[in-house]
Image: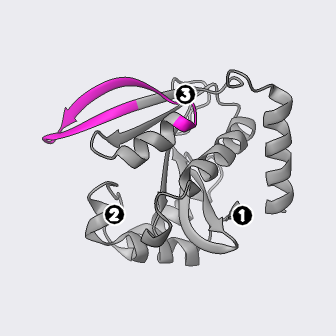
Amino acid sequence: MDITLGSRSAESAAIYFEKTNNAAIRRVLPQKAQTAEEAAADFYASQLPGASSFGRTILADGQYVGDVWCYCINPGGTPGAMVSYCVFEPSLWGRGIASRALERFLLEIAGKYGLKTVGAFTYSGNLPSIRVLEKNGFRLVEELVEDGVSSRYYQRDMEPRRGQHMAEQNDLLNSQKRVLS
């Protein structure tokens, strides 16, 4: 399966809101926007100069199946941004799509924003999300309970992964740029 990243639009933001507005996804992924209008406003805010969020659509064989995004972008901070992702098509869960999309996205935002570290939260019971993060070099930093829900905070240093040279990361990033153009 060919996994690529595409540009987000007001239309994709509306589709994403509709597709993720179900109990199965809301159980494992808290949603900031509670209405389609709030989702649209968040998208438009991400398009403004100096926005602190940025995202891409996830495409599997050219079909829109989810989103990957970063927020709280602060290149000088630790972390320099937080990431999140969601494949909203249940028939595609467990097929490595989120892992591959996050890998490509991390390379893109590291170059785009000069990030040194990236963080991510997930519920402790969300084992698929934990696997996605760990496959992408994130390490558990903290376990916490918020509003009675056990969560985990992961972080990744954006230096080349062990066994991977910067040239390999750049090759992947450059191939992704060609797809996005």
Secondary structure of the residue carrying tag 3 is strand
Residue 49 horizontal side relative to residue 22, left or right? right
Q: Label 3, label 1: how many angstroms apart (C-alpha)? A: 25 Å
Q: Position of residue 25 (x, y in %)?
A: 33, 63
- Callout 1, which amino acid? Asp
Disc 3: which residue: 156
Specify start and end residues of the magenta stretch as a single range.
135-153
Q: Judge by depth and name the residue closer to the eye, 93 or 58.
A: 93
Q: Residue at x 42, y 46 (%)?
A: 129
- Callout 2, which amino acid? Ile
Q: Label 2, label 3: how many angstroms apart (C-alpha)? A: 24 Å
Is residue 88 shown above or below 82?
Answer: below
Disc 1: which residue: 2
Q: Badge 3: how crowded within 10 Å, few (<14), some, or many (20+)?
A: many
Q: How many marks?
A: 3
Q: Residue 25, which numbered label?
A: 2
Q: Residue at x 69, y 37 (%)?
A: 113
Which of marks 2 and 1 precedes in the sequence?
A: 1
Which of marks 1 and 3 precedes in the sequence?
A: 1
Q: Judge by depth and name the residue closer to the eye, 88 or 112.
A: 88
Q: Are marks 1 and 2 in contact (CB under 8 Å)?
A: no
Is residue 151 shown above or below 49?
Answer: above
Secondary structure of the residue carrying tag 2 is helix
